[in-house]
Image (cartoon, rainbow, N blue to C red):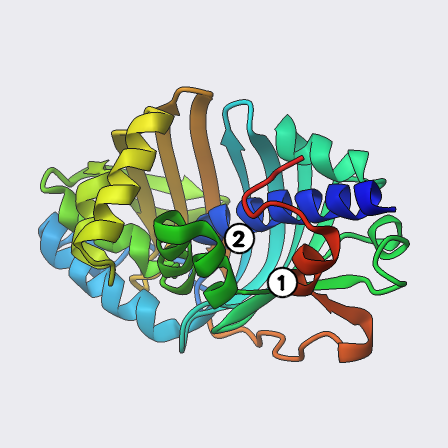
């Protein structure tokens, strides 16, 4: 029983790492902006300098506060997955996503726990919840949802946990725009269609550690730990591309880079800005706290198997 508990706790840790890593990679349908931006030519952003245009996009996208999302992410041999749902960013990250792991060690961990590789996730300002299905519930007293507090994850992970907490709480669509503005080499590529929507394409190369230093609330020690993590993973820069519709709203974002475990690729689509975002938390009677699982399982924090 103790082995089983430790195994499911390790699986829950693996899922925690995966869910926090994809928070910044939320993507969506991109067929239109908040007022049906699928018609006409890309507007004001196509006529301004790249920096001026992107500052306007950052303001408009940030002010929209919510959108439907759909996308895919690949992180070398670690994971490949797709997700869809709705997210909000009026006060930190919120929303509900259906995430399906299609490969990699993360997907394997879920399947070893008896699941089908799919996770229902709900994000809130200070916590998020994951439902891995009936197979996981069979090992948690029939409870389907695991609650992860960002504070607890930060404490368990030390400096790396602080980084994870900061990234997920500040992961909003305009971060992609901020990344390009901070890159120093942003350029306008041209006019292209994104799922039938006329859009303006911008591209740039981002120094990952430098961008985090500029846009996070991390102190010097936490930033040093993050840079060490990046070095161990073999991550230095990422190429970021965004596509913007005539209403100055993001309709697509891609990120590409290299890691020691392989290539990192994320493709993101956004649509239906201003959409309603689920705000109801899972029932307490159907929820187990991740920190309590650690205590029961006697698992070592940070274990992934």
Q: Is residue 291 shown above or below 22?
A: below
Marks 1, 2: nearer the viewer: 1
Of labels 1 and 2, earlier in sequence is 2
Count the numbered circles shown. Answer: 2
Is residue 19 rendered to the left or right of residue 9?
A: left
Is residue 175 rendered to the left or right of residue 132?
A: left
Where residue 109 appears, as percent x and y from the top left, is: 71, 35
Q: Name the residue under label 2.
A: 28
Q: Residue at x 88, y 46 (%)?
A: 1
Residue in the foreground of this view, choosing between 148 and 18: 148
Residue in the foreground of this view, choosing between 212 and 140: 140
Is residue 162 rendered to the left or right of residue 207?
A: right
Camera sees residue 52: yes
Where residue 162 appears, as percent x and y from the top left, is: 37, 56
Give the alpha-carbon distance from disc 1 to disc 2, as whole Å.
Answer: 32 Å
Q: Which residue is drawn at 34% across and 51% down?
A: 159
Do tag 1 and tag 2 residues touch (Cβ < 8 Å)?
A: no
Q: Residue at x 47, y 39 (%)?
A: 267
Image disc number at residue 291: 1
Q: Residue at x 66, y 47 (%)?
A: 299
Where residue 80 appears, as percent x and y from the top left, is: 59, 32
* Rendered image quadrant of residue 263: top left
Q: Is residue 156 shown above or below 100?
A: below
Where residue 173 appears, as percent x and y from the top left, is: 38, 58
* Rendered image quadrant of residue 236: top left
- Rate crowding at label 2 as few (under 14), some (14 to 19) or many (20 or more) other CA atoms within 10 Å: many
Is residue 291 rendered to the left or right of residue 94?
A: right
Q: Considering the numbered disc 2 on the image, is that residue within a helix, a strand or a loop?
A: loop
Q: In the rendered image, which quarter contains the C terminus? A: top right
Q: Considering the numbered disc 1 on the image, is that residue within a helix, a strand or a loop?
A: helix
- Rate crowding at label 1 as few (under 14), some (14 to 19) or many (20 or more) other CA atoms within 10 Å: some
Camera sees residue 67: no
């Amino acid at each position: 029983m103790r082995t089983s508990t430790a195994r499911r706790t390790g699986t829950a840790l693996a899922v925690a790492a995966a869910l926090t890593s994809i928070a910044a990679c939320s993507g969506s349908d991109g067929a239109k902006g908040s007022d049906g931006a699928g018609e006409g030519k890309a507007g004001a952003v196509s006529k301004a300098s790249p920096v001026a245009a992107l500052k306007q996009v950052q303001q408009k996208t940030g002010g929209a506060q919510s959108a439907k999302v759909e996308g895919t992410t690949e992180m070398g041999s670690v994971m490949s997955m797709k997700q869809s749902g709705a997210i909000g960013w009026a006060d930190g990250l919120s929303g509900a996503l259906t995430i399906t792991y299609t490969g990699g060690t993360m997907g394997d961990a879920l399947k070893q726990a008896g699941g089908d590789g799919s996770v229902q996730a709900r994000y809130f300002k200070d916590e998020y919840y994951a439902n891995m299905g009936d197979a996981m519930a069979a090992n948690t007293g029939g409870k389907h949802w695991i609650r992860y507090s960002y504070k607890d994850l930060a404490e368990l992970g030390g400096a790396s946990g602080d980084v994870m907490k900061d990234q997920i709480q500040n992961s909003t669509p305009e971060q992609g725009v901020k990344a390009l503005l901070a890159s120093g080499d942003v350029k306008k590529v041209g006019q292209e269609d994104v799922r039938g929507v006329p859009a303006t394409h911008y591209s740039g190369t981002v120094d990952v550690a430098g961008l985090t230093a500029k846009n996070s609330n991390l102190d010097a020690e936490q930033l040093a730990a993050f840079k060490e993590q990046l070095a161990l993973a073999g991550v230095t820069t990422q190429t970021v591309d965004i596509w913007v519709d005539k209403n100055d709203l993001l309709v697509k974002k891609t990120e590409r880079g290299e890691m020691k475990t392989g290539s990192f690729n994320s493709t993101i689509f956004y649509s239906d800005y201003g959409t309603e975002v689920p705000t109801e938390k899972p029932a307490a009677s159907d929820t187990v706290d991740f920190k309590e699982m650690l205590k029961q399982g006697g698992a070592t924090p940070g274990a992934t198997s």
